[in-house]
Amino acid sequence: MAVRVKICGITRLQDLHAACDAGADALGFVFYEKSPRHLAIDSAAMLVRALPPFVQSVGLFVNAEPAFIERVLRAVPLDLLQFHGDETPADCMRYGRPWIKAVRVNRDTDLLECAADFDAARGLLLDAYVAGVPGGTGERFDWSLIPPHLSRPIVLSGGLTPDNVAEAVRRVRPWAVDVSSGVEAEKGIKDAHKIARFIAKAKEAS
């Protein structure tokens, strides 16, 4: 199975082009004000309009008010919603769009229960648990905590880099991998060389 690659936290047009040229399957756009990768709605709309065919746009939200999400959706043609907070299944489903649910993993996380609770999700994005931070920390979690047969496809995130993504793909066999800080020159600014290496290593390993 060929692994899919999502480059998250896109803030600049040149980073968008670098990711698409390197073969990214999806790009993530962050609508969370506390994130250094946060985008204004009009900036996100401009970037998403620049996407070529068959590269999916993903909007990331963290405990956002429904009215705000609806305002984003009216302006930005997102293909997939990514919920990174304490949203319930009903919260995620209310917009009539495909969605995935992020789960921050530690030894107390019951991923089988999460998969059952969020069975309408297109997949579960598994990230590292860091207290008080919803994601984008660059921390890696213990991949052995992932059960071998989850009922939802896995998007593996958390601490991935060009140097460890091949190992991650071989060990976990996820449907997709998701990276943000691991391909950055600084927070919110991507490194085109790191993006290209990350995608190449991920695809080669699958």
Image (cartoon, rainbow, N blue to C red):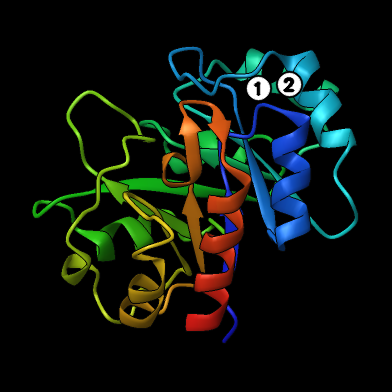
Q: Residue furthest left?
A: 107
Q: Residue at x 43, y 60 (%)?
A: 162
Please state the horizontal and vertical placement of residue 191, each as a whole percent of the image. Answer: 57, 41
Q: Residue at x 63, y 46 (%)?
A: 192
Please state the horizontal and vertical placement of residue 153, each as a whole percent of the image. Answer: 48, 69
Q: Which mark is residue 72?
A: 2
In depth, the one of 67 and 22 nearer the eye is 22
Secondary structure beneath dot 1 equals helix
Q: Residue furthest bottom?
A: 1
Please state the horizontal and vertical placement of residue 7, each as a whole percent of the image. Answer: 59, 48
Q: Residue at x 40, y 66 (%)?
A: 165
| Residue 145 left/right relative to 168 | left
Please state the horizontal and vertical placement of residue 188, each as a whole percent of the image. Answer: 53, 26
Tell me the crowding category of disc 2: few under 14, some 14 to 19, or many 20 or more residues within 10 angstroms, Cα based: some
The quarter in which the N terminus is drawn is bottom right
Q: Residue furthest front?
A: 193
Q: Which mark is residue 79?
A: none
Q: Residue flagged by tag 2: what amino acid is it?
A: Val
